[in-house]
Amino acid sequence: MKTYSYKLLSIFVILVSFFILSFSTISRAQYTCLPTCTENDSRFLTFGGQDLDTFVFDTLTFGIGSHSSATRLELGIFDGDSIGLWDGGTGDSFIFSLFADPNGDGTGTLLVGQWSSDGSIGNNIGNPMPDNDWFVINVTNIPEAISESGNYSYHMVVNNTNTTVQVINNYKVRSDGTLFLFPTDQPFGYEAGARGVDADFFIETLKIIYPNIDIDDPACVNGGQFCDFNQPGCCLNPTTYDGNFDFFFLVETPQPLLNLWDGDFDFGPKAPSEGPPFVDTDDPNTPPGIPVFADAPNTNEQTSAGTIPPDDNLQLGIPRRPPNVIYDLIAPDGTVYSNANPSATNEWELFQLNTEPGCAPDICDIEVESIPAGVWRMRIRGLDLANLNFIRSFEKILGVDEDDNPVLPEPQDPAPIPTMSEWGIFSIFILFGIVGVYFLRKKKTLRREI
């Protein structure tokens, strides 16, 4: 009888544990993020300011969707400040403005809320965005944001209020709905951040990227030189950033051609002072002159002029991530199209896939049989730390979930899995059934003993 009771007690404990586990799992929030949801992986969207030898753009627009059944929308800005870890320069104020956008095309004008990185204006006056942490925004979904699908649609504009100051602002964005970048004439910058506004912040950033780093250990740093990360036991291993950087974009219908502009990739590894021949070459299908979308004062005409500083240069030390920076476009069926010679310093190059038979090199980069609809992947490989790159896309850049999988821009119905209450009812039903059987058997046993 004791053995039977212990078995029942064990089952009871298992069911209660299952009930608690189901509650914690199902109630966990799921986010869509750009470029990633991971705080320590060094992958950021980036705004650059003057005098830092980079392109300067003042706005970036995100599309945001919230499911028709949701009563509120949660947004998050990671490292929204520009004065501590991950960032460089003297700092600046950035404004994040959320608009109802029922047409889903970025034209909505009803301001829902506004927040500033330094807490100087908007809904967070006196409450600046934190350094190296999430600033959480909660807004109630409003009828003015309901789209034709019945879901709520918004867009958020991030604005650099002063492009004349020295600044590198690295940040991430997340939503508990959907998230994407609009394919506007405004390119976007990104980098694997390895910066700090001063030496102390820079060292603290390195400790995040290299968890085993110890600048006071001669085996790690000797005479200002770090150990070779290719050697076993080097303090630069492991690292949270492996040199790969992914973006996903949506081709909504089959296309005859696919254009993508890459800018300021610093494809090296030779600088102009080292003399020709340079690894970077003159791209034959990039039109002459400055592209209409470019930041003209900081843009060079496309040539083969080399880079400052070149990506993958041996003198870079710990930021270096071999190979020399290149990227692939990966079609929905897995076909890979590689750009093995992207842009150099402060220039733009066009990379084009084209279905035109016999497409000449001065027209397209790669002739393809088809450009199918679906989610495409851009994989940047060998991107050094602190190499700020830019992309001009004609397609929506999709956010990713917490497992780095792309999320479609229109909110989808949740997966048909039991809710917490259904799991709870089921567990309680089984629990009472077992307890009932136990007491019935105990009653019968007592009767037999009498």
Image (cartoon, grey):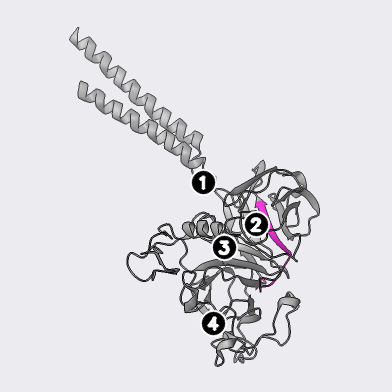
Q: Where is residue 286 in the image (x, y as percent from the top left)?
A: 66, 85
16 up-or-down from 369: above or below = above
How many residues crowd mark 4 within 10 Å: few (<14), some (14–19), many (20+)?
Answer: many
Q: Which is closer to the viewer, label 1 or label 4?
A: 4
Is residue 166 toward the left or the right of residue 32 in the image? right
Q: What residue type is labelled 3?
A: Arg
Q: Which amino acid does label 2 sit on?
A: Ser
Contact (CB < 8 A) between labels 1 and 3?
Answer: no
Q: Is mark 2 on a helix, strand or loop?
A: loop
**Magenta region:** 52-65
What quarter of the picture does the N terminus occupy? top left
Which residue is disc 3 drawn over?
195
Is residue 444 toward the left or the right of residue 16 in the image? left
Q: What element carries label 4?
A: loop
Q: Is mark 3 on a helix, strand or loop?
A: loop
The mark nearer the N terminus, 1 or 3, is: 3
Contact (CB < 8 A) between labels 3 and 2?
Answer: no
Q: What element carries label 1?
A: loop
Cα distance in 3D space between marks 3 and 2: 11 Å
Please give the label number shown on residue 82. Answer: 2
Q: Where is residue 162 in the image (x, y as percent from the top left)?
A: 76, 62
Q: Which is closer to the viewer, label 1 or label 3?
A: 3
For the residue pair 256 and 14, the one nearer the viewer reads as 14
How many residues crowd mark 3 within 10 Å: few (<14), some (14–19), many (20+)?
Answer: many
Contact (CB < 8 A) between labels 3 and 4?
Answer: no
The mark nearer the N terminus, 4 or 2, is: 2
Q: Which is closer to the viewer, label 3 or label 4?
A: 3
Residue at image point 29% right, 29% down: 10
Which residue is disc 4 drawn over?
268
Which residue is disc 1 drawn over?
416
Contact (CB < 8 A) between labels 2 and 1?
Answer: no
For the residue pair 187 and 239, the one nearer the viewer reads as 239
